């Protein structure tokens, strides 16, 4: 069995080429400028990345900080999904409910999650719970909006089939509306995971935190350790990319029927 | 014997903004047990709407639909096969077929469901495709699965809304023969909407021709030709001619 086709491999190669060129340019300028504060040499960034379990600047290691951030993101993301999916199903399903909730959704949606920070601290105190709130806030709306759109895009004919067999409203939601909307919900989850990841870094940069990739970047900045900032950014990028790959693979596997019905 | 289904004085008006359009204007007829009745008529006359009303997917303005075997809740026990198969793409053929059986209203055990599904899969020649998904099936197979899904609940009348119109002529004939066989095997009563006179004559015991909007029953034709019916049969051609004239509004047998 061929796991990756030649074509895909070639595409990956082209993408990799640009990354390599950018790294070469970075290294070239770094050598030229000779100023670690503006452009740290790649070697220094990689040396941080290659020793992920070593304590950094007397604090926790890169790996430990990354795990802290991941835990926060996953928890916030799950809380958001648990709230947004059922809400989206109901709002998308019932025009009446939508009339009540649409204005408040449209007003809250554009508010950047980090703007909630002062409230979050006032309500939940400094630390894990506040960060969780910010992440959940950020992840909630993409899932909600996609769920609503997904439900409204479910083919009317499918719903008629369930009506024809006398399904109860709950059965209709469970057996037709949810699975029919699932591809869109999945897209919402993918988008919101990216948002959650951005939120965690921003939230951890605020005063009062003591762990996480965002904290590490801010801490390294205060101590002038630019190569640690670089390493943190690489980790953020790699995890974001990894999550996206997992979500896309899941999409292809779970919703192979899409566009072929 | 009482008819399985009797339709009395069905009227239906659609409003689209300011414009009001009367579609059905007092449709009445009856369907006897084990009968195949075809409904024909000009496009847009409300044939599909009539089936949808019978299956409670739409409400008539006036008129009554009497079903001999309505369930206790008063809901229809008919089942519909749609033109566009309408299978759930995320379910396997098996899960699609048993969809209606698994709903709480049926109160069936998984064992009974499996037994019924087995029979239907073999009846519709889908045994080896039970685990396939709809997008892996041909058009004809999808429509057979859709028929099996409707038959699963043992409907009092199988309603078919132009079920074969999206299929090629060979597949269409194959499925028409299958409908005949199902009628023989299960003694199913079938009410079928079609725009194809040949199909109607090939299958039907009786053809109900509706007029253009607002639709009334323009005529009822009895097809008394032994099966399998040949298109070259003079009686076949005569009925075909009559239907075409009626649909075009040149001959009316208004009751």
Image (cartoon, helix red, strand yellow):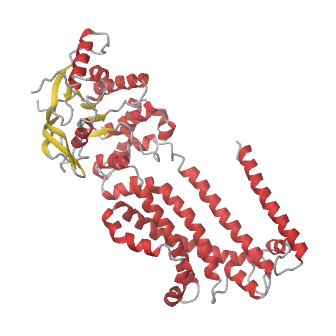
> Residue at coordinates 20% horizontally, 36% vertically from top-left?
B213
Which percent across, then down, holds residue B204? 25, 23
Q: Is residue B39 left or right of residue A93?
A: left
> Residue at coordinates 72% horizontally, 71% vertically from top-left?
A235
Q: Is residue A119 above or below residue B25?
A: below
Q: Say which quarter of the image contains residue A62.
A: bottom right
Q: Is residue A36 above or below residue A245?
A: below
Where is the C terminus of chain B found, in terms of image quarters? top left
Which percent across, then down, holds residue A165? 30, 46
Q: Is residue B151 above or below residue A116?
A: above
The residue furthest front is B18
> Residue at coordinates 69% horizontally, 71% vertically from top-left?
A236
**Residue A220, visible in the rendered structure:** yes
> Residue at coordinates 72% horizontally, 80% vertically from top-left?
A217
Nearer the observer, A149 or A255: A149
Nearer the observer, B86 or B215: B215
Q: Is residue A206 above or below residue A182?
A: below
**Residue A212, visible in the rendered structure:** no
Nearer the observer, A253 or A151: A151
The residue furthest left is B255
Which percent across, then down, holds residue A159? 35, 50
Question: How many marks on residues?
Answer: 0
Q: Say which quarter of the image contains residue A209.
A: bottom right
Q: Is residue A121 left or right of residue A23?
A: left
Q: Is residue B251 left or right of residue B229?
A: left
Nearer the observer, A60 or B122: A60
Which percent across, then down, holds residue A32? 90, 73
Where is the N terminus of chain B found, in terms of image quarters? top left
Q: Is residue B237 left or right of residue B222?
A: right
């Amino acid at each position: 069995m061929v796991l990756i086709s030649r074509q895909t491999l070639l595409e990956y190669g082209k993408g990799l080429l640009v990354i390599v060129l950018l790294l070469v340019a970075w290294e070239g300028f770094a050598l030229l400028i000779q100023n670690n504060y503006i452009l740290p040499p790649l070697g220094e960034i990689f040396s941080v990345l290659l020793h992920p379990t070593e304590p950094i600047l007397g604090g926790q290691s890169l790996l430990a900080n990354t795990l802290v951030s991941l835990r926060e993101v996953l928890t916030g993301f799950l809380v958001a999904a648990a709230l947004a999916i059922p809400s989206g199903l109901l709002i998308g399903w019932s025009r009446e409910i939508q009339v009540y909730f649409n204005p408040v959704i449209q007003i809250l949606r554009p508010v950047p999650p980090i703007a909630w920070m002062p409230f979050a601290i006032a309500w939940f105190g400094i630390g894990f719970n506040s960060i969780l709130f910010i992440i959940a806030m950020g992840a909630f709306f993409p899932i909600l909006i996609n769920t609503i759109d997904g439900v409204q895009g479910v083919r009317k004919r499918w719903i008629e089939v369930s009506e024809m067999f006398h399904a109860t409203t709950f059965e209709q939601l469970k057996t037709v509306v949810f699975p029919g909307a699932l591809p869109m919900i999945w897209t919402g989850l993918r988008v919101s995971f990216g948002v959650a990841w951005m939120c965690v870094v921003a939230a951890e940069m605020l005063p009062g935190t003591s762990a996480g990739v965002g904290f590490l970047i801010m801490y390294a900045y205060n101590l002038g350790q630019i190569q640690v900032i670089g390493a943190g950014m690489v980790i953020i990028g790699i995890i974001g990319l990894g999550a996206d790959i997992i979500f896309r693979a899941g999409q292809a596997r779970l919703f192979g029927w899409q566009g072929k019905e | 014997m009482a008819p399985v289904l009797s339709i009395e004085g069905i009227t239906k008006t659609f409003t689209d903004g300011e414009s009001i359009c009367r579609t059905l204007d007092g449709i009445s007829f009856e369907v006897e047990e084990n009968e195949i009745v075809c409904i024909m008529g000009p496009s847009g006359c409300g044939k599909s709407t009539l089936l949808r009303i019978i299956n409670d997917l739409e409400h008539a303005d006036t008129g009554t639909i009497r079903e001999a075997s309505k369930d206790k809740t008063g809901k229809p026990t008919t089942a519909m096969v749609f033109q566009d198969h309408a299978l759930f793409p995320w379910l396997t053929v098996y899960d699609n077929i048993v969809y209606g059986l698994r709903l709480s209203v049926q109160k069936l055990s998984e064992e009974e469901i499996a037994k019924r599904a087995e029979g239907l899969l073999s009846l519709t020649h889908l045994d080896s495709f039970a685990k396939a998904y709809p997008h892996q099936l041909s058009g004809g197979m999808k429509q057979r699965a859709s028929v099996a899904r409707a038959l699963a609940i043992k409907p009092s009348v199988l309603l078919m809304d132009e079920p074969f119109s999206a299929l090629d002529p060979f597949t269409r004939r194959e499925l028409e023969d299958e409908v005949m066989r199902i009628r023989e095997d299960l003694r199913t009563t079938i009410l079928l909407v079609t725009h194809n006179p040949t199909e109607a004559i090939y299958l039907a015991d009786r053809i109900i021709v509706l007029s253009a909007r607002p639709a009334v029953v323009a005529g009822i034709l009895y097809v008394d030709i032994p099966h399998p019916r040949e298109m070259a049969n003079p009686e076949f051609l005569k009925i075909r001619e009559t239907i075409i004239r009626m649909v075009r509004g040149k001959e009316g047998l208004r009751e």
